[in-house]
Amino acid sequence: MRAGMFHHVRTYIVAIAVAGIAAALVSTIIFTENNPQWTTFLAGILVASVLAEAVRASRTEWALMRRTAQLSATKDKLEREVSQRKRADIKVTDAQMRLHLVDEVLLTMVVLVDPGGYCRYHNRAFRDWLHMKAESIDGRHLRELLGAKAYAGIATAVRQSLDGQSVHYEHFQEMTGGAVYKLSVEHVPQFDAAGQVTGFYLLAEDITRRGDLSQVQSHPVIKVVSTPENISGQSDYTAQDMYLDDFSGQVGGGVDAGKQFISAILSGEFRLYCQLISPMDEGKTVHYEILIRLMEEEGGLIPPGAFFPLAERNGLMPYLDRWVVRHVLQWAANTHSRDSESIFFINVAQATTGDPEFPGFLKDTLVEYGLPGSTLCFEIAESDLAVRSESVADFVRQVRQCGCLAALSGFGRDGVSFDKIRGFQVDFLKIDGATIINMLGNPVDLAKVVSIDRVAKKIGVKTVAEMVESDEITAKLCEIGIDFAQGFGISRPRKLTE
């Protein structure tokens, strides 16, 4: 627009200049009485002046056009930068949301450990597990946080991670107050641009199940001694600490603990979650394993490793198992398609398999909600079968009379023996997760998985691979012919109501 205005003004300026020079020339000619020499001279001056004015105007116009082009380019660059900034802001917002998910919502414990073994980042799940505040964890060595004995149990894995190796292992840990956890732990090393190790992420998942509690006597238990009294003399008790301390008064206080546990159930403090059990063949029905968590006052989730031992010691696991069965059937009757062939796997405690009144409760509850028994599959730990084979066999026989199914979990953990399932019929064999995790790097574990699947198919039992955490493992399971898979590589747990 400015260039166009200048073009019109320039035309008038040039015309006025030419007219002025022409008038001066005519006056000079008249004054010199038409002298040809003067006329020629003045005409040359007139032409030179016009040319000079035209050149100057052209240069001015070119300079203006160049500045206009530069201004336009600067404007485009600014618009691009604004657009990039907006995209960057969106990415930052997304990253903050993901970080919030890791820090406040994710149940997996996440800790960033530097090359010196000091904690540089941790999420809420880790803080809740240790029952400590953030300021009591930041910058402290893992040995201080976990205790010398617990740290000694993972020291080799820590050294391997700081050497750049990814490490995965499982172990039991007992917290002060009696809570026992079975943890699945993974170390993921971090590298800088030069390829040097800058630390590692420690990811720990509570995988405690009812049947795992009976293994504590035969497996090393790492005690975590981080308590409010030995952490800088501070009082870091949370609502979870007080809740569990109340539960722990078993001697002389067992009745009160039992009342509080039942009160927690009745007041809706327990929550049901489910994890997908996916078929290896597309098009087949998916199933779900039911998981249970306890809500604390601040809205956090207490994992099963914290309350299962207390419930076991107070003889309340059958009561909790009944609550799970009733609420799963209630949910299935109200929201799940009655035409669905999905099965809900429910872990039952050793005490429940010996409860003579449980089968009658199961039959009545199925009738109450109008659902077939095949909606449920009761999952029994292989370790429970080894301890109480007769009562487990009788339990399986009675629930199968109600139309329900049965599964044996942790199969192959301590060797493969199909003699264990003589005397009762199971519908699913769930292959031990540690065996599944290691099978790609351990020929013995791979051979174990292959043999379990081969024999299971001959006797008409479906196989389920536990703790499937990668696409490579999934592909190998498909190649072997395993029927179903579950684990974080398939699906993370979610609320049953979602």
Image (cartoon, helix red, strand yellow):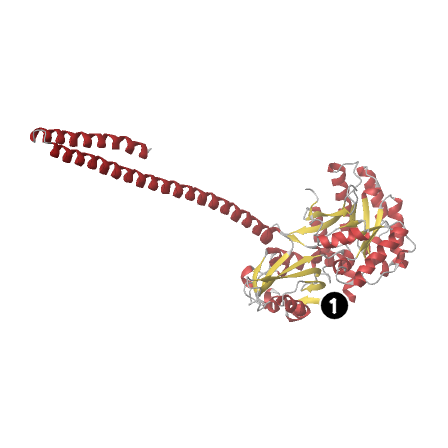
Residue at 22% from the left image edge and 32% from the top image edge: 14
Vertical placement of residue 331 versus 441, above or below = above
Where, by quadrant of the figure, is residue 125 drawn? bottom right
Residue at 79% from the left image edge and 44% from the top image edge: 343
Left of 489 or right of it: where is 381?
right
Where residue 10 appears, as percent x and y from the top left, is 25, 33
Left of 220 or right of it: where is 151?
left
Where, by quadrant of the figure, is residue 361 drawn? top right
Residue at 79% from the left image edge and 66% from the top image edge: 218
**Amino acid under disc 1:** Pro
Q: Which residue is mark 1?
A: 220
Front residue of 481/16: it is 16
Front residue of 253/287: it is 287
Q: Is residue 277 visible?
A: yes
Left of 118 or right of it: where is 403?
right
Where residue 346 appears, as percent x and y from the top left, is 78, 49
Left of 122 or right of it: where is 468?
right
